[in-house]
Image (tube, helix red, strand yellow):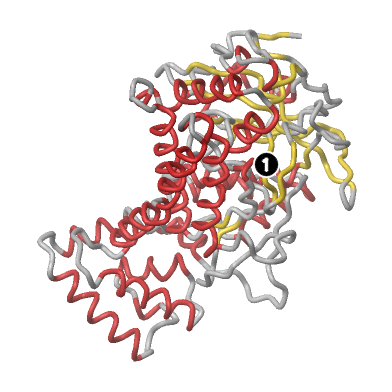
Amino acid sequence: MTNNKNQGWNFDNSYARLPDFFFSPQEPTPVEAPRLVTFNEDLARKLGLNPEALKQADTFAGNELPDGAFPLAQAYAGHQFGHLTMLGDGRAILLGEQIAPTGERFDIQLKGSGRTPYSRGGDGRAALGPMLREHIISEAMHALGIPTTRSLAVVSTGEPVFRETELPGAILTRVAASHLRVGTFQYAAGAGEANELRQLADYAIERHYPEVADQENKYLSFLKAVIDRQASLISKWQLVGFIHGVMNTDNMTISGEAIDYGPCAFMDVYDPATVFSSIDREGRYAYGNQPYIGGWNLARFTEALLPLLDENQEKAIEIGQEEIAGYIKLHHAYWIAGMRKKLGLFNVEDEDEMLVDELLGMMKKYRADYTNTFRVLTFGNTDESVLKGYPDFTEWLERWEARRGRQEPSRDDSHELMKSSNPAVIPRNYRVEEALEAAVKNDDFSVMERLLDALSNPYAHIPEQEEYCKLAPTSDRPYRTFCGT
């Protein structure tokens, strides 16, 4: 059943014009009693949609299809914790591609909308808590200035889902530049023909990197561009203390957006070994490992592209290895540039990396909160830091102040740079859990809405955000996150 009702849908479904090897047509499975529990009006307007006409649950539950939709489930593969598996959208359905008033193209996907040919025995559904977590985290990431998929709406389904316990079901409407993944290319390279891999690459170039289309070796330029975007993206994660938790190759987009917020969380006390995911028992995806896992995933992407890089396989491997070898250096360049901004530094000096490394070392040694340490440095409130009184920190402060004094911009300029680079608030884990518990157990979404409001402008540094800057109450139990499948 289709539905328009002046909602503003403007679909042009280019992915559906690829060979059917890449997808299976699949309509969402209707639900009994959908209820709209959160709706992103600002995002709706950006997409050219009519918020008032859209405020009905049936559209976001899949019970009614927007006019022009071509619902399908995408096929892809993925290295999950290092092991290659054939996958696909097991509980998500792409409704189509909305063309916004700016001309930008956005995937509109329903997550938790029922079984597909790729469900592998799963129920195709999602629970309310994990869908609200994705809504909160993805919107927080967007506000932090990090490329990310976003959440347009979450509906409760009125139906239970069964995991370890019975949970209320939900469907999230995810908006993305696209859902092309490293795993999509692994699928094409492993299960398709050479022509299908080429068609996929040409499609990705046209959609995300049109500037390379006319270059002599456009596939090499494509590879370089994807590596660059991923290096930039992961550096941004590191700079705000974000831990994705499940960096499988099917969770790495070709567009350079963060995607699939399952067992994700933000680091409190600085420690590169920090890992929250209950299934990451070996720490493969720990905070400090994320840049290297990004490189590992990009190596798998490069392997998939080898037939397009050069007709001679040995030459193709040589080309690919050279590009991957430069990834860590590129990531580090983005990261250290971001760290200079966090410390209010406009120019480059050889001492800078040592200054950063020493600060991080003290933060780890004395168990300092990552976000709040940079926040107190921004405002000169070092008396509020757990680092206060330690001789090595006192000496470090003197060298940092001397370093700031050796640059042409004023201290006021340095302060403004730090304000715009160090968030006052992040979605602290205990605050996220408070919001989810109120919503899931008590049907109270006001806690989440207040949290989202505080997170909507993280660089404002206003009194209203103070409550959300506080550290979590002490606990004997380590914080753990779950995939929510």
Q: Residue placed at 60% from the left, 12% from the top?
A: 17
* Quadrant housing the C terminus: top right
| Residue 22 picture location, percent across and down | 67, 22
Tell me if residue 374 comes above or below residue 126 in the rendering.
below
Q: Which residue is mark 1?
A: 78
Residue 144 visible here: no
Q: Is residue 335 left or right of residue 77?
A: left
Q: Residue flagged by tag 1: what amino acid is it?
A: Gly
Q: Is residue 99 left or right of residue 24?
A: left
Asked if 142 appears above or below 468 in the picture, the reply is above
Report the residue at 19% width, 72% height from top.
403
Q: In front: 358, or 159?
A: 358
- Residue 251 lies, with reference to residue 112, above or below; the image says below
**470 and 133: which is toward the camera:** 133
- SS at mark 1 in the image: strand
Q: Quadrant of residue 38?
A: top right
Q: Is residue 481 left or right of residue 292?
A: right
